[in-house]
Image (cartoon, rainbow, N blue to C red):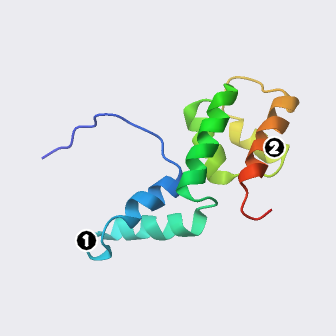
Amino acid sequence: MPRKIIRIKPLTIPEVKDILETLSKEGMDQFQRRTLDYAAKMSYLDPENAKKLIEELRAEGVLEEEEIVQVVNIMPKTIEELRAILAGGRKVIETSVLEKILSILDKYRIDK
């Protein structure tokens, strides 16, 4: 029976990891196990801090939801890396705004 998509919500890697960890390992299919393995290796934040960071970036009002999720997933360290992530957008973001975004990201880094 086909599934009906009710809504689409972008999730950060830490959120995906948190969701998959609630499932029993025996009940997971191969795709879910591989996804959990990837999420465990690529999570730069814990789920609570990821949600706080999303809210803080959203409050800036510059980035769209999908861009925010990508920034949180990748946690860029330089303006050049941040520009590369946001390059697909149609707007040009001033350097001062990018610096502010990086300073927000720096508050949440684990590897300070």
Would residue 76 be visible to someone looking at this image?
no
Nearest the eye: 83 or 16: 16
Discs 1, 2 touching: Cβ within 8 Å: no
Write the residue at 66% across / 37% down.
Answer: 56
Query: Circle 2 sits on which residue?
Result: 103
Determine crowd level at label 2: few under 14, some 14-19, many 20+ residues with C-alpha closer than 10 A.
few
Q: Position of residue 5 (x, y in %)?
A: 28, 37
Would residue 79 be visible to someone looking at this image?
yes
Q: What type is the residue that disc 2 sits on? A: Ser
State left or right for residue 64 relative to residue 103. Answer: left
Count of marks overlaid on the render: 2
Write the residue at 62% across / 58% down.
Answer: 45
What mark, if any, has residue 27 been given in the picture?
1
Nearest the eye: 44 or 47: 47
Q: Earlier in the sequence, mark 1 or mark 2?
A: 1
Nearest the eye: 79 or 49: 49
Q: Quadrant of the C terminus?
A: bottom right
- Given this view, does label 1 or label 2 mark the residue nearer the observer? 2
Task: Say above or below: 100 vs 73.
Answer: above
Q: What type is the residue that disc 1 sits on? A: Gly
Write the residue at 66% across / 45% down.
Answer: 71
Q: Position of residue 110 (x, y in %)?
A: 71, 62
